[in-house]
Amino acid sequence: MKINSAIQLTAYERKQLLLVKEYVDVHLHESLDPGELVLSFDISVYKFKAGFVQLCGRSFSEYLKWKRMEKAMELLCNSNKINYEIAKECGYKDTSAFVRAFRKWHGQTPDKVRKL
């Protein structure tokens, strides 16, 4: 299903979506369910999906993956934390799922990045 990126957002809806984005940026370590965010930030599912693409340039799930992988890379390069700790801080319950996602996103494993 293609989302219309020319959706008209009210000032309130735009503000709510920006609040969602800020919330996600701070809570990457948590399980973030779009259904719960829609309810918490009082915005329709349609406006949430289409508006998020319009404001952020990518879908909610892609934005979330991007931010988590960005944070993972930062932690790998600037800390001595082990993969389990990084996975947990980036919202992954399972280290192997984190390593798979990281390799798919960055094209190499976290251990290879750390060695560079």
Image (cartoon, helix red, strand yellow):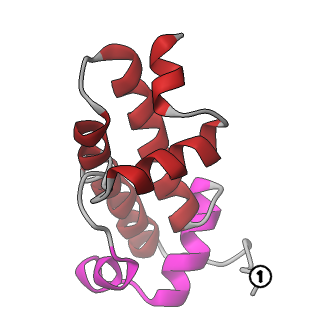
Report crowding for label 1: few under 14, some 14 to 19, many 20 or more residues within 10 A (C-alpha): few
Q: Residue at x 58, y 42 (%)?
A: 103
Q: Position of residue 113 (x, y in %)?
A: 52, 21
**Height in image: 64 above or below 17?**
above
Query: If the image is split into quadrants, where does the C terminus sit?
Result: top right
Quarter location, residue 89: top left
**Height in image: 84 above or below 16?**
above
Quarter location, residue 3: bottom right
Q: Which residues are magenta?
A: 33-56
* Mark 1 residue type: Lys
Query: If the image is split into quadrants, where does the N terminus sit?
Result: bottom right
Residue 54 magenta: yes
Viewer-side residue, 77 vs 36: 77
Q: Position of residue 5 (x, y in %)?
A: 72, 71
Quarter location, residue 34: bottom left
Query: What residue occupies the far top of the structure in this picture?
Result: 116
Residue 111 magenta: no
Q: Residue at x 43, y 57 (%)?
A: 97
Q: Position of residue 71 (x, y in %)?
A: 39, 35
